[in-house]
């Protein structure tokens, strides 16, 4: 069973409020480099877009897109809800987005931690919304 991708209290037809380009490299774990691409801010939620590229030397990931439980995200030190995590890709490349609630205010600091490969150190970085 899958959960709805859009939170139930968000009306259809919403428009993005702003898009923040990031291009922040969170680092590499076992041959998989992980980059935060952008933050799309919508009324009531935000999408944190990411890409993962393999150098071909590491072990395969259990999932090409980290599930919601693999993410810990705070905004100005306060935890936010990771509503969903979706994407597409193959062994060498995947990209997708993590849906967050509530949407961060402009200028706030997001601390992002993702457990890309269980048994290795999580990747971590901070970005400004």
Image (tube, rainbow, N blue to C red):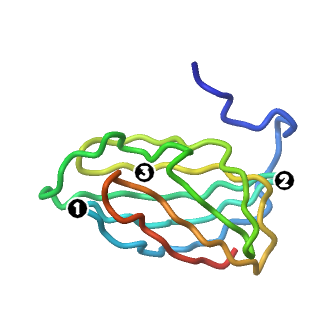
- The quarter holding residue 72 reads bottom right
Q: Nearer the viewer, mark 1 or mark 2?
A: 1
Q: Residue furthest top?
A: 1
Identify the mark nearer the N-term, 1 or 2: 1
Mark 3 vs mark 2: which is more N-terminal? Answer: 2
- Neighbour class for label 2 at 10 Å: few (<14), some, many (≥20)? some
Residue found at the very far front of the displayed protein: 119
- Name the foreground residue: 14 vs 29: 29
Tell me the number on the disc at residue 95: 3
Residue corresponding to mark 1: 30
Of circles 3 and 1, the one toward us is 1
Provide the secondary structure element on which disc 3 rests. strand
The kind of secondary structure element at disc 1 is loop
Snapshot quadrant of residue 119: bottom left
The residue pinned by badge 2 equals 43
Task: Using the numbered discs, state the Cα–Cα distance from disc 1 to disc 2 in whole angstroms.
Answer: 37 Å
Q: Secondary structure at mark 2?
A: loop
Labels 1 and 2 touching (C-beta < 8 A): no
Q: In the image, which disc is placed on residue 3? A: none
């Amino acid at each position: 069973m899958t959960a709805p991708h859009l939170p139930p209290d968000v009306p259809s037809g919403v428009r993005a409020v702003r898009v923040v380009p990031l291009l922040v490299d969170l680092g590499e774990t076992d041959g998989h480099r992980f980059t935060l691409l952008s933050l799309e801010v919508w009324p009531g939620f935000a999408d944190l877009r990411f890409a993962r590229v393999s150098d071909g030397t590491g072990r395969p990931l259990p999932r090409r897109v980290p599930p919601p439980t693999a993410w810990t995200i705070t905004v100005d030190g306060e935890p936010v809800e990771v509503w969903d995590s979706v994407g597409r890709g193959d062994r060498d490349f995947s990209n997708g987005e993590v849906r967050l609630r509530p949407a961060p205010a402009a200028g706030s600091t997001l601390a992002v931690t993702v457990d890309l490969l269980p048994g290795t150190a999580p990747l971590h970085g901070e970005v400004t919304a």
